[in-house]
């Protein structure tokens, strides 16, 4: 099929396309491996003919002629054969979706050395297999016989992606600093760190020396470019712009906090059709970033579809109308003979189209009405020799001679041995015009035949001796696995002519067990191996079985499914401390606390959803408050400045808490009788007479006293209960959860009437 010519120097047979002789300009072999047309290297001595214009005369008659690569009649152009009787193949320069192609590889013409002639020629090579599947064309001889007779494919390359995904905006980093405080206390930490003091001076003095805009990066500044532009690499606050913080700064066009919006991409760029990023919020169905309106994504960022009037790469045509009888079908394919639609317009010019693949009906596969006598066998014709002789191998009605016409036709392809002109199949001439014999497909009773399948296959249901196949006859038939011809049922071939196998209920050598069932989850697997944890099969009480020795993956070595809280870091867990404490360094969901997510976790004192300082909650999630400055802020209950005292009655304590029962100071406003002294109750009251003297010495006397005082106790119980309730309220622990949200925003508010 390929035309091979040579040049003065050296040459090689082209693997793709056509090798062409080239005119020598130099006598050096340095051109080998270079791209054709390299200066100083030989060039072609003649132009190649345009083979696309050379259409064989009989192309389309379903008969392979010498000047054709292939000819499938009505299936030309819808199979591996084109409408010019040339084979479609990978590398022919045209994408042919109907044969499975999704792309055409790039081809480059290279100077090569022909090993047979030691001459220089050119060879078209694939630059790389860059998309979809790669394929190779068949090799054909001069007679048009090809091996294989179709293009072959190698599905080893990944499929082309319809669209590229843009990574989401990066999330905030997790700080690694530690927070101070007493993490063991069941109370909220009310002891806050003081502002750090620099050696040799106060923090205020150092802050006064830091000036944003002096082109000097001072402590606390990320950058300092000395200008007033807020839209460069350094903001007017001497911080580095960060996409996703909701503030348009630096080189950002917009900032939608890391999410796509109607006009803003998540990477802080303007959402524009054609920018190569698909923004679903702006209504884009796709965005390939090019201006090619014929690919899978149009220039309006909508997916191309059949009927939009634009011929995409996977469409043969697209006329955008609903007429299914013109030159483009409504499914965007070209009309073809056999699609069941009569297309009479040129170049199709069909006379009929019955939509089937039957070539011997009233409409053959050429979609032309059959004509007897045109030398083309078509439709219901048995033959067509184009003459008017009615006694040769083809009748004038285009029918062929047949067995039973009373004439012995020994010529090819009839090869009759006899012809008695009757339909008696058991006489001396059967209905196939053959003399009776074992193997002729006819059971002859006079020859004692049990069967006759007409073939020479000894392993089917009828042997070559015309005997019916049976298990035990020593011949392995198609439906038998074995046949040893004996009646021993315990050897490798059973009396049912089946090979011994795992699952037949018989313990064979090499099997650990054989329970004869197909249940893989019982004590004996389908491989006849006893079930054990680690065999890769979940059986019995096993929750899982991954068959490996890794104890920290999704299945432990004891075949249980990992869970959070077992003190083993496994699967997707970041930590596992085995407790239900959500205020330590490991959360109850086995993840590390994250400062800046808006949730107070672990040892965090606060979490305002950002990592900014000087907003009440610092970048390590610690509360930025100072007890003793006379201002109530953060979670302080009260702050009386220099009057804060841990010894004065009813004063604000040094930790900015109001006076409370248990602070070792007797507070008159709380009506305390004592506080943390010997004999003092938990309610800061002295015990009653009975509580102080209820011992065994007074036992007998107290019986009478209690009996008489029962009435008094009944009437005074309300007073006692009121006192107990008041004492309990005075020592009740306060937390942020006890404070209404509106009062958190009013630090001067006095909770529970306390200062």
Image: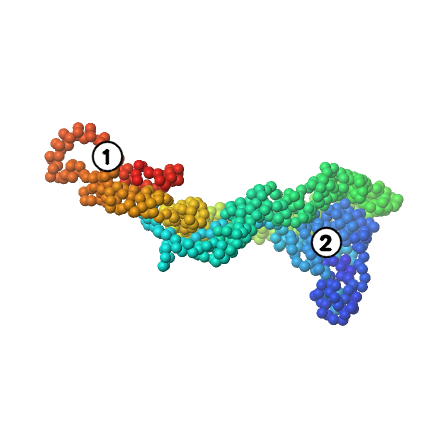
Q: Could you say which is closer to the camera, residue 21 or residue 439? A: 21
Residue 621, percent across and down?
A: 40, 49
Residue 561 image point, x, y percent: 43, 48
Its colouring scheme is: rainbow
* Residue at point 28%, 45% (across, down): 643
Kindly report the distance in space between the C-alpha atoms of the residues bearing marks 2 and 1.
Answer: 99 Å
SS category of the residue bearing label 1: helix
Name the element at disc 2: loop
* Residue 739 figure quarter: top left
Q: Residues within 10 Å of mark 2 (few under 14, many from 20)?
A: some
How many numbered markers are drawn?
2
Residue receiving disc 2: 93
User: Do we see residue 585 in this rendering?
Assistant: yes
Give left or right: position of 494 versus 311.
left
Label 1 neighbour load within 10 Å: few <14, some 14-19, many 20+: some
Residue marked by disc 1:
723
User: Relative to 451, is 219 on the left or the right?
Assistant: left
Q: Give whichever of 28, 471 is nearer the camera.
A: 28
Marks 2 and 1: CB-CB under 8 Å?
no
Instruction: Identify the residue shown where x is 42% and y is 47%.
Output: 615
The foreground one among 653 and 432 is 653
Q: Where, quadrant-wise, is the C terminus in this rendering?
A: top left
**Horizontal side of residue 308 vs 547, given as left or right:** right
């Amino acid at each position: 099929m390929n035309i091979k010519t040579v040049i003065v120097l050296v040459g090689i047979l082209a693997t793709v396309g056509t090798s062409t002789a080239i005119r020598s300009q130099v006598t050096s072999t340095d051109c080998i491996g270079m791209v054709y047309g390299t200066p100083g290297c030989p060039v072609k001595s003649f132009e190649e003919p345009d083979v696309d214009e050379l259409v064989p005369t009989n192309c389309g008659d379903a008969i392979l002629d010498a000047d054709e690569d292939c000819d499938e009649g009505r299936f030309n152009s819808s199979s591996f054969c084109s409408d010019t009787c040339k084979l479609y193949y990978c590398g022919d320069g045209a994408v042919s979706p109907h044969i499975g192609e999704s792309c055409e590889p790039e081809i480059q013409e290279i100077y090569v050395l022909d090993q047979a002639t030691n001459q220089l020629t050119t060879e078209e090579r694939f630059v790389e297999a860059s998309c979809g599947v790669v394929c190779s064309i068949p090799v054909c001889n001069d007679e048009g016989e090809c091996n294989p007779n179709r293009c072959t494919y190698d599905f080893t390359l990944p499929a082309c992606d319809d669209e590229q995904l843009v990574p989401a905006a990066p999330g905030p980093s997790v700080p690694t600093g530690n927070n101070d405080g007493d993490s063991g206390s069941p109370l909220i930490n009310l002891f806050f760190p003081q502002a750090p003091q620099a050696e040799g001076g106060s923090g205020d003095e150092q802050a006064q020396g830091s000036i944003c805009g002096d082109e000097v990066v001072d402590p606390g500044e990320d950058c300092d470019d000395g200008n007033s532009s807020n839209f460069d690499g350094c903001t007017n606050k001497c911080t580095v712009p960060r996409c996703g913080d909701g503030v348009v700064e630096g080189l950002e066009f917009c900032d939608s906090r890391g999410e796509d919006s109607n006009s803003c991409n998540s990477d802080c760029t303007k959402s524009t059709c054609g920018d190569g990023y698909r923004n679903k919020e702006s209504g884009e169905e796709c965005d390939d970033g090019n201006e090619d309106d014929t690919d899978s994504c149009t220039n309006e960022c909508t997916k191309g579809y059949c009927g939009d009037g634009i011929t995409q790469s996977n469409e043969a045509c697209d006329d955008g109308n609903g007429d299914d009888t013109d030159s483009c079908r409504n499914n965007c394919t070209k009309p073809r003979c056999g699609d069941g639609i009569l297309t009479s317009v040129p170049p199709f010019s069909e006379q009929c189209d019955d939509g089937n693949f039957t070539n011997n009906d009233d409409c053959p596969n050429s979609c032309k009405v059959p004509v007897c006598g045109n030398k083309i066998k078509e439709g219901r014709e048995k033959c067509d020799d184009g003459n008017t002789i009615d006694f040769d191998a083809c009748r004038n009605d285009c029918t062929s001679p047949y067995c039973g016409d009373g004439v012995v036709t020994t010529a090819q392809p009839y090869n009759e041995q006899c012809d008695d002109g009757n339909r008696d199949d058991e006489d001396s001439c059967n209905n196939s015009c053959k003399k009776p014999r074992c193997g002729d497909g006819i059971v002859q009773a006079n020859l004692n035949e049990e069967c006759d399948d007409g073939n020479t296959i000894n392993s089917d249901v009828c042997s070559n001796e015309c005997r019916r196949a049976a298990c035990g006859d020593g011949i392995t038939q198609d439906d038998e696995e074995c046949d040893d011809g004996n009646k021993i049922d315990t050897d490798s071939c059973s009396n049912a002519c089946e090979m011994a196998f795992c699952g037949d209920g018989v313990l064979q050598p090499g099997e650990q067990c054989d329970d004869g069932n197909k249940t893989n989850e019982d004590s004996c697997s389908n491989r006849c191996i006893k079930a054990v944890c680690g065999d890769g099969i979940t059986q019995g009480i096993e929750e899982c079985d991954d068959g490996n020795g890794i104890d920290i993956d999704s299945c432990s070595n004891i075949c249980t499914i990992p869970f959070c809280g077992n003190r083993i870091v496994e699967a997707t867990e970041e930590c596992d401390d085995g407790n239900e404490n959500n205020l330590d360094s490991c959360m109850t969901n086995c993840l590390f606390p994250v400062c800046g997510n808006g949730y107070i976790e672990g040892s965090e004192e606060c979490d305002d959803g950002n990592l900014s300082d000087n907003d009440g909650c610092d970048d390590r999630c610690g509360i930025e408050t100072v007890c003793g400055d006379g201002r109530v802020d953060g979670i302080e209950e009260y702050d009386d400045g220099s009057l804060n005292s841990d010894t004065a009655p009813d004063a604000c304590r040094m930790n900015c808490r109001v006076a409370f029962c248990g602070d070792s100071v007797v507070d008159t406003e709380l009506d305390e009788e004592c506080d943390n002294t010997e004999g003092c109750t938990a309610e800061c009251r002295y015990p009653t007479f009975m509580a102080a003297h209820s011992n065994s010495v007074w036992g007998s006397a107290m019986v009478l006293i209690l009996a008489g005082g029962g009435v008094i106790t009944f009437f005074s119980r309300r007073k006692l209960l009121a006192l107990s309730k008041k004492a309990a309220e005075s020592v009740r622990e306060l937390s942020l959860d006890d404070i209404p949200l509106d009062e958190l925003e009013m630090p001067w508010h006095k909770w529970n009437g306390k200062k």
